[in-house]
Image: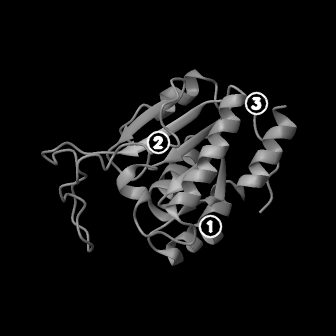
Amino acid sequence: MTLTTLDPRTALVVIDLQAGIVAAPVAPHTGAEVVARSAELADAFRARKLPVVLVRVSFGADGADVPPGRTETAGSGAPRPEGWDVIVDELAGHPGDITVTKHNWGAFHGTDLDVQLRRRGVTQIVLTGIATGVGVESTARAAHEHGYHVTLVTDAMSDLDERRHRGSVERVFPQLGETGTTDEVLELLGRTHG
């Protein structure tokens, strides 16, 4: 885990820190820990006038925008309780933040995330969120394919399956970018962005 640099136009991209997901039993870090670390990073990015992107997953009441396809696991088309897709209070309410609503695992497919980042000259993204092996990994893969430098904050993400979290962190993420902790990103941010 060695972080080398943060580009002059780096954005924080926070994946699915919303009421219905943060409340789930995740590991190795609790939802509250992931939210607290992501909020600390968001405050540091905002203080330096760097973009903060809050990504949420949501579906229409009729379920027509739920991804189709046969899988061997239970489908995601079940009705969700009201408010499950609301960004948590610790991150919400900052008018300069960008909010992206996705209908798939990754934050790039079917959204304007790439356009939002490129219009702001962003060349690197720092990723946090839940779930590590689903939304975070899918977004990291797409970011890498889109040519962004990718930094993954391993103590500011968690998963419903701790083995999946570890597999992403140990095997997948080193091929997509650089990994580090919240403290390491904050230290690097302080050195490179005053």
Please report contact status of discs 2 and 3: CB closer than 8 Å, yes or no: no
Give the labeled residue for mark 2.
Answer: 89
Give the labeled residue for mark 1.
Answer: 169
Secondary structure category for the residue under label 1: helix
Looking at the image, which residue is at 20% across and 42% down? 60
Which numbered tag is attached to residue 8?
3
Residue type for callout 1:
Val
Where does the C terminus fall, quadrant-wise?
top right
Q: Mark 2, mark 1: which one is toward the viewer?
A: 2
Please report contact status of discs 3 and 1: CB closer than 8 Å, yes or no: no
Q: Give whichever of discs 3 and 1 has the lower sequence position.
A: 3
Q: Is residue 153 left or right of residue 132?
A: right
Residue 28 position, x and y percent, is 57, 72
The crowding category of the residue bearing disc 2, from other C-alpha atoms within 10 Å (few below 14, some 14 to 19, many at least 20), is: few
Q: Which is nearer the eye, 102 or 42? A: 42
Q: Give whichever of discs 2 and 3 has the lower sequence position.
A: 3
Please report contact status of discs 2 and 1: CB closer than 8 Å, yes or no: no
Residue 175 position, x and y percent, is 65, 60
Q: Give whichever of discs 2 and 1 has the lower sequence position.
A: 2
- Considering only vertical position in the picture, is 71 above or below 33? below
The crowding category of the residue bearing disc 3, from other C-alpha atoms within 10 Å (few below 14, some 14 to 19, many at least 20), is: some
Looking at the image, which residue is at 16% across and 48% down? 63
Residue 108 position, x and y percent, is 45, 41
Rounded to the nearest angstrom, the CA distance separating label 2 from label 3 is 28 Å
Residue type for callout 2:
Asp
Residue 84 position, x and y percent, is 31, 50
